[in-house]
Amino acid sequence: MIEHKYFPTLEIAYSGERLAGVDEVGRGPLIGSVVAAAVILDPAQPIDGLTDSKKLTARKREALDSQIRERALAFAVAEASAAEVDALNIYHATHLAMRRAIDALAPAAEYLLVDGNKLPGHLLPGQAVVKGDSRHCAIAAASILAKVARDAQMVALDECYPEYGFARHKGYPTKEHLTALAAHGPLAEHRRSFAPVQRQLALL
């Protein structure tokens, strides 16, 4: 558990060891997959420094990513593609990625703690936790795995298309990204259902 000054202590209706924290990264970007992770931590191998991935430097996230993969009882990273985001909408695609990550855990989870205010429609019992990545270590661990995985995808995309600046803005609709989108047009990996991409497609 992580103490959070704005929220009461988290009450969890489960006391076993196969509790999975679940989180996602990539709802806001204009390009690429939405990535989710699920993590069952090992109480016998605690990991120091787990918190919301956005509060950590890239170097610290990568170090923790390695520790989580070495010490967790189980972990999985999954995604929903840009095409699935366009077909389903970002809300449903996010939950699809989460369900895929949960289903890939071995051993399987018995209970879910999911960052946010909605459960992803999985059969397992669980609870949604607002600001969960700042309130529970397992959700924080999931946020770190998802962030490192998605950032790596953006770095790889940057190597193919350096003129878009993906390594810097990670696909979010920054001024740099929007300027590049206007200058060079959408790529196959862009999310066509997102308004800035739709506007550029309409100009073609």
Image: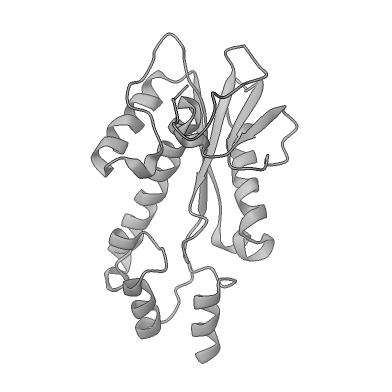
Determine the residue positioned at 44% across, 73% down: 187
Report whether 23 appears left or right of 67: right
Residue 104: x, y in percent? 59, 32
Rendering quarter of residue 157: bottom left
139, 34: nearer the viewer? 139
Residue at the outermost left position:
59
In the current view of this chain or complex, which residue is farthest to the top?
44
Q: Name the spot of residue 111 as percent of width and height, x first.
A: 65, 23
Residue shown at 53% from the left, 68% from the top: 191
> In this orientation, does residue 61 appear?
yes
The x and y percentages for residue 85 are 60, 60
Name the outermost residue toward the right: 123
| Residue nearer the viewer, 75 or 133 | 133
Total labels: the figure holds 0
Is residue 199 left or right of 66 when viewed as pictured? right
Position of 15 compared to 159: left or right? Answer: right
> Is residue 162 shown above or below 12?
below
Residue 204 visible in the picture: no
Which is nearer the eye, 1 or 107?
1
Relative placement, left or right, of 153 versus 57 is right
Q: Position of residue 110 (x, y in %)?
A: 66, 20
Q: Residue at position x 51%, y 91% from top?
A: 203
Q: In terms of image quadrants, where is residue 181?
A: bottom left
Identify whether 100 is placed above or below 63.
Answer: below
For the rendered model, the colour scheme is one colour
